[in-house]
Image (cartoon, rainbow, N blue to C red):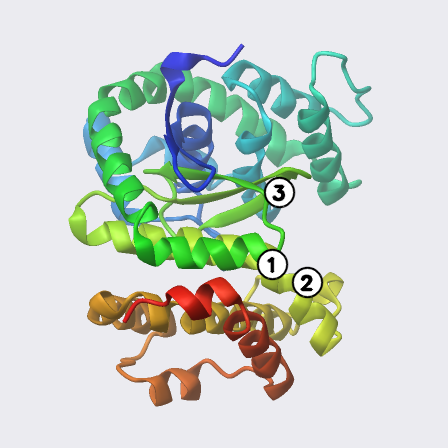
Amino acid sequence: MEHILDTISLDSTHNTRIVTEKKTDLILHLLTHYDINNVASNFDMDYVKYISDLKGEKSSSLHEVLKEIDDENLVYLSFMPAFFNNIDSLFRGLGYLSVPNEVMLNSFTETEDQCLQLLKNVYGNNDLGGLVKFSEIAKFEFEQFYSSYWESRRKDYLREINKFRKLWESDENDIVLAFLRTQGLPAITVYLSEGMRKNGRGMRTNDSSVCTITKMPVNDNEVFVSYYIAVHELLHQVIDGVTQSILKIDCQQRSLNPDDEGYNIHEQIENSVILAQHLLMEKTVKNRTKEYYALVSEIAGIDINSESEFMTHFIVDDRMRMKLESMIFQNNHFSNKQIQ
């Protein structure tokens, strides 16, 4: 049974659950202390220092012990908690992954089993030493610090996810979600996590459910940032397949390491989603134009204040641009209800 005290869940209109939970936050909290050269890295030295100061450490022992692990595949563990029912089953799952050729146990649900098989494929015959070490560190950190820390933050978390829900239930997001529904997106779960420091995550946990992980806003200014990231990750579930089909991209060659040749494939996929979101949001966030362009500028690493500057930086193949415009602007709900 779900550990109800380890989860804060608000049911929203638009068939959405907005959630913050201890098991998701624990894994992301650990990955925030783990530095790798990968765009999926969640490393944040400011957060590392904040946690170290809370513990009364002169330097972060968690960061130091994780530095001993050389395993970029650990970034895939950030998806794992969404598939598991509670912290106990999550720890069992980490234990299962850490043992070569381990036989699947009956204690896992079908959804948990699906996740474990995917992660087994990621690791293949690779050395599991880093995963074993990570599992040990996760249990120790949970018991010695993180469980009580998360509980101490409960009221703050509830306040912030209520702010997020207000924006999620706005007319402007109704239009965005209407587009996603026409593309066959099922029920949505939005995870807000203090430990999600960079970018976000998105995944399908089964045929009828899709989820996104985005950063927990810590003030009113960050609510829109968290919202943008959540929509961005949901759009990946719709746009990625279209991009691969139109541009004949082989995702097996995709790399998240900026130093690899396959990083160009990642950029094409990412730019398609950014453009799709731009086409949606330029009509639905007119009262947030300044916020929107400030965020896009941060993503681009340059100042972007206009449509032409956006298009100059985020380059998308003409075939893909035309396809996205067709998908979005031919959507009847979008056309009839766009905010003036």
Residue 38 is at least partly visible in this image: no
Which residue is labeled 3 in the image?
A: 204
Instruction: Check whether the beta carbons of the residues at disc 1 and disc 2 lie within 8 A of each other.
Output: yes
Let me know if residue 49 appears in the view.
yes
Residue at (70% x, 22% y) in the render: 96
- The residue that appears at 28% across and 36% down in the rendered structure is 161
Q: What element carries label 3?
A: strand
Find numbered disc 1 in the image and state the secondary structure of the residue it sits on.
Answer: helix
Distance, label 2 to label 3, CA atoms, is 13 Å
Circle 3 Cα neighbour tier, 10 Å, few/some/many (<14 / 14–19 / ≥20): many
Distance between mark 3 and mark 1 Cα atoms = 11 Å
Q: Distance between the residues labelled 1 and 2?
A: 7 Å
Say which amino acid is labelled 2: Gly
Residue beneath label 1, please?
238
Residue where numbered disc 2 is placed: 241
Q: Position of residue 201 (x, y in %)?
A: 50, 48
Q: Between disc 2 and disc 3, whose residue precedes? A: 3
Of labels 3 and 1, earlier in sequence is 3
For this rendering, which residue is in front, 252 or 313?
313
